[in-house]
Amino acid sequence: MEVSVLNRKGEDTGRKVTLNETVFGIEPNDHAIYLDVKHYMAAQRQGTAKAKERSEMSGSTRKLIRQKGSGGARRGDINSPVLVGGARVFGPQPRDYSFKLNKKVKQLARRSALAYKAQENAIIVVEDFKFEAPKTKEFVEMTKNLNVADKKVLLVLPGIEKNVYLSARNVKTAKVMAAPQLNTYSVLDAGVLVVTEDSLKEIDAVLAK
């Protein structure tokens, strides 16, 4: 699949690049995508929910009522879970929600997500560029020139470009990411991918193995 290379002004440079068929031209695997998105979202969870158990509550340990004869449930001290204000039984404890996912499944999921974007013609290739200084106005102007200002944009760069990142930080519908850090969730969440020429080489180096 050939894609025209544009410049920052949205003009055709007259050059074309061929998207790697082993990355952008495969038959997407929906189950791999599901697993990788689930893996990504699980890793984002803080897992800090915590409820006090009986041994952690403060209060008198005096037994309030006798064991039998009251007609109600057995209970011990004031921290009993059957009392209002008492401890919680089997409450949430801090935990790690992340789980292991095989590297080959992750790569298949990322290739599948990129293949979906290629099928939707939602990939724009631009020539490599840099910003001399952080300027949000300059970034917004570029999105208008590329006709993506009204879409959710994921700009993929070959590496970390601080000025470009800072320029896009205040734009709610835009996200900047380095090609080696590309993940399935971010690709699917974006309405359109704006990829630089060098970024395509980085993506091929990681996913075309």
Image (cartoon, rainbow, N blue to C red):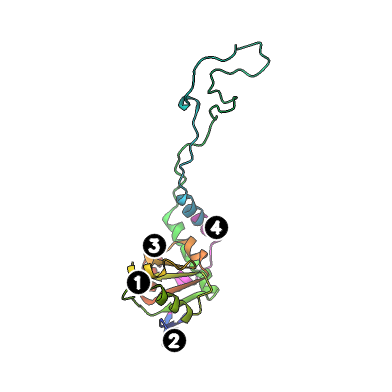
Tag 4 or tag 2, which sits nearer the N-term?
A: 2
Q: Residue furthest bottom?
A: 14
Q: Is residue 79 above or below residue 152?
A: above
Q: Nearer the viewer, residue 63 or 204?
A: 63
Q: Residues within 10 Å of mark 3 (few under 14, many from 20)?
A: few
Give the residue at mark 2.
Answer: 11
Callout 4–callout 1 Cβ contact below 8 Å: no
Give the residue at mark 1.
Answer: 134
Give the residue at mark 3.
Answer: 181
Q: CA distance from mark 1 to mark 2?
A: 23 Å
Could you say where residue 21 lies in the image, as x and y percent from the top left? 46, 73
Look at label 4 and name its amino acid: His
**Quadrant in the picture for residue 138:** bottom left
The segment highlighted magenta reads 18-36
Q: Which residue: 58% across, 18% down?
A: 75
Q: Which residue: 53% across, 67% down?
A: 27
Could you say where residue 145 lies in the image, as x and y percent from the top left? 46, 81
Look at label 3 and name its amino acid: Gln
Give the residue at mark 4.
Answer: 31
In this orientation, does residue 204 appear? no
